[in-house]
Amino acid sequence: RSLVTARTRVVGVLVPTLTNPVFAGSVTGLAETVRRAGYEILLAVSDYQAGRELEVVETFLSQRVDGLVMTLTAADGPVTETVQRAGVPLVLLYNVPKRPGPPFVAVDDAGAAAAMVAALVQAGHRRIAMVAGRFAESDRARRRYDGYVRALRRAGLAPYGLVEVPFLGAQVAEALAPLLERPDPPTALFCSNDLLALAVIDAVRRLGREVPAHVSVSGFDGIEVGRLIRPRLTTVVYPTVEMGRLAGDLLLRRMAGRRIGHRYVPYELFPGDTV
């Protein structure tokens, strides 16, 4: 049937990892949407490695997938260019290209981060540092840092420190120790995602301090486990499963030859108890 119709009824999906519930939820929503239309997904992970992304895409193209949904280390680069040259419909998930490119589904990372940091300022914090996944591994982390800086400047404050760690296998306590052992340590830590925020809370305790008594911690993503721990994690919440559904819908429309636009999903601040 694939030979006759020149279609495989398969969609390639690339995400950085499935250990983060954000991506697992989005893949669930995406798979539900495309399966209702008669498609199956071919799923791969990149482990936040740009070189691995290109290998996966070349495999997808050799398998003649009908379309692609991808979350990349960076939206603008050789991976996107390779797909566009091949003429395969593409929707980016979580990425936002800096120049005109493929359609995307994303959250306003910079705006949401700025809102969270502004809430920290409103709570009385003046020494606010950021703990982020490596910018080279995620353009989302970079945009969230931009929002962090924007909010501090609006409040007449300067960034109080940045700690970058790998997304996978990070030794957070070792990376965080120099910052917390300063004579005037930060009173709040804004983390670029919730899994990192949970690791930071554990690291803070290992370093002999408590959250939020000695230092406040906030995250970004709204994963369910953040509401199950005590104290509950203060974070940015947005609909990850719905983002997958939206990406699937956009891809189906694009594969049908329709013109489509971009989609930003809403977010909200969950107050939690860690600030």
Image (spheres, grey):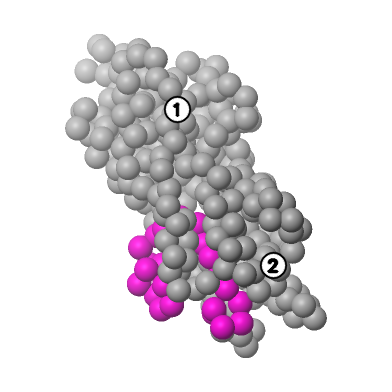
The quadrant of the rendering that contains the N terminus is top left
Q: List x then y, in percent, for residue 256.
A: 31, 15
> Element type at marker 1?
loop
Depth order, front residue of 146/175: 146
Rendered position, 174 above or below 6: below
Q: Nearer the viewer, mark 1 or mark 2?
A: 2
* Residue 126 falls left or right of residue 120: right
Q: Which mark is residue 182?
A: none
Q: Earlier in the sequence, mark 1 or mark 2?
A: 2
Depth order, front residue of 201/136: 201
Q: Is residue 221 magenta?
A: yes
Q: Quadrant of residue 38?
A: top left
Magenta segment, which residues?
A: 211-232
Residue type for callout 1 = His
Task: Please rate how many residues cluster around mark 1, counting C-alpha atoms within 10 Å: few if below 14, some from 14 to 19, many from 20.
Answer: some
Residue under label 1: 262
Res. 199 visible in picture? no
Q: List x then y, in percent, for residue 272.
A: 43, 69
> Which residue: 47% across, 61% down?
235
> Which residue: 51% across, 41% down?
108
Magenta: main secondary structure: loop
Rendered position, 195 above or below 138: below
Task: Please rate how many residues cluster around mark 2, counting C-alpha atoms within 10 Å: few if below 14, some from 14 to 19, many from 20.
Answer: some
Q: List x then y, in percent, for residue 179.
A: 73, 73
Residue under label 2: 126
